[in-house]
Amino acid sequence: MNTRFFHRKAGVQVALCMALAALLTSPLHADGFTVGAPVKCKWQKIGNYYTGKIARRNGNTVFIQYDDGDTETTEIQYCKLIDPNQTKPARNNQNNQNNNQDSSNIKKLEARSSGSDNWQDWSISLAGGKGRLKANGTGQHMSWDIELPGRDVKVLTCIQGSQWWTKWQYRYGGNQLIAEASSLTEWKIDSTYNRLKVRTRWSGDTDQWIVSGKKGEMKVTRNGGSWPSWEIEDNMPGEDFHMKMAAIFAIIVATEMPH
């Protein structure tokens, strides 16, 4: 009998058992939040959930690489594991129909009042008609009345606890978007499954902005002169109308209002 074979086989079995025991008792594997695991996490711990993967983990702290290219360090309590075979829920058909209408294209934005009231009254031209945007209050307590043709938009309000211009909620039809600034020249507009990025076209030039997303770009350019007037080249067919409107608000807040 070849005893060396049996000793070697027994040694391999012991090693496998020890490795399996270590795997089962490891805190990195017990909760499933392992490096490479697909997850959805709350952006900045208070925003909407976005999908990505865990790139690194140290205790309960994880470094997330999001599918849209953004990254952040957060904690596992703000993340959920997702099934790799899980598919995204279908979007609301009514919203898709509205988004595909040419009437949702945004054309022009113009102040209705002077700078004496900090540019709080605006008109906006759409392909299907005109609307009005009017701010109430100032700073942390500011809200907006929004009148748009055929659109159920309620208010845009500052989120309490933030420097007043850095984080906003855009509410419509029971839904909510988040507009968040990393600086006066760079914003992100977040919905449940989508994100737009708003940034100046040239560094230091706040007269030209680009709104970009998966469905194209929207160029927003300020006309010359002291009276605020913006021309909008909307090349985002099929993009969510309210996402684009929230981006417009970000530009107004960043560019026209005192901070």
Image (cartoon, rainbow, N blue to C red):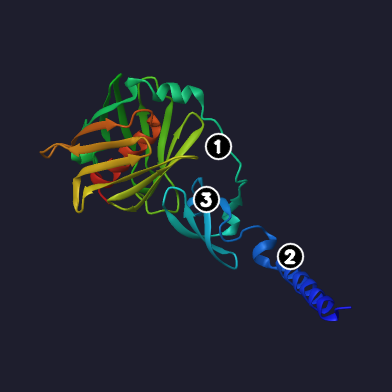
Above or below, 140 against 103 in this view is below
Q: Is residue 7 left or right of residue 252?
A: right
Q: Amino acid at mark 1?
A: Lys
Q: Is residue 161 left or right of residue 89?
A: left
> Which percent across, then down, holds residue 29?
67, 62
Helix, strand or loop at disc 1?
loop
**Most extreme residue toward the right, as rendered?**
1
The residue lying at 30 percent from left, 27 percent from top is: 132
In depth, the one of 188 and 213 nearer the eye is 213
The residue lying at 45 percent from left, 25 percent from top is: 96
Q: Is residue 7 left or right of residue 59?
A: right
Above or below, 108 against 159 in this view is above
Q: From where the camera sits, is residue 85 visible?
A: yes
Residue located beneath label 3 in the image: 42
Residue located beneath label 2 in the image: 24
Q: From where the camera sits, is residue 114 visible?
A: no
For label 1, count other residues whose C-alpha is less than 10 Å away and answer few (under 14), some (14-19) or many (20+). Answer: few
Residue located beneath label 1 in the image: 88
Numbered mark located on residue 238 in the image? none
Q: Amino acid at mark 3?
A: Lys
> Which percent across, then down, holds residue 251?
28, 42
**Most extreme residue toward the bottom, as rendered?**
4
Above or below, 258 against 154 in this view is below
Asked if the residue at tag 3 contacts the one at tag 1, i.e. Cβ–Cβ closer than 8 Å, the answer is: no
> Which percent across, then down, holds residue 78?
57, 54
Instruction: Nearest to the eye among marks 2 and 3: give it.
Output: 2
Helix, strand or loop at disc 2?
helix
Spatial CA distance of label 2 from label 3 is 28 Å
Spatial CA distance of label 1 from label 3 is 17 Å
Q: Amino acid at mark 2?
A: Leu
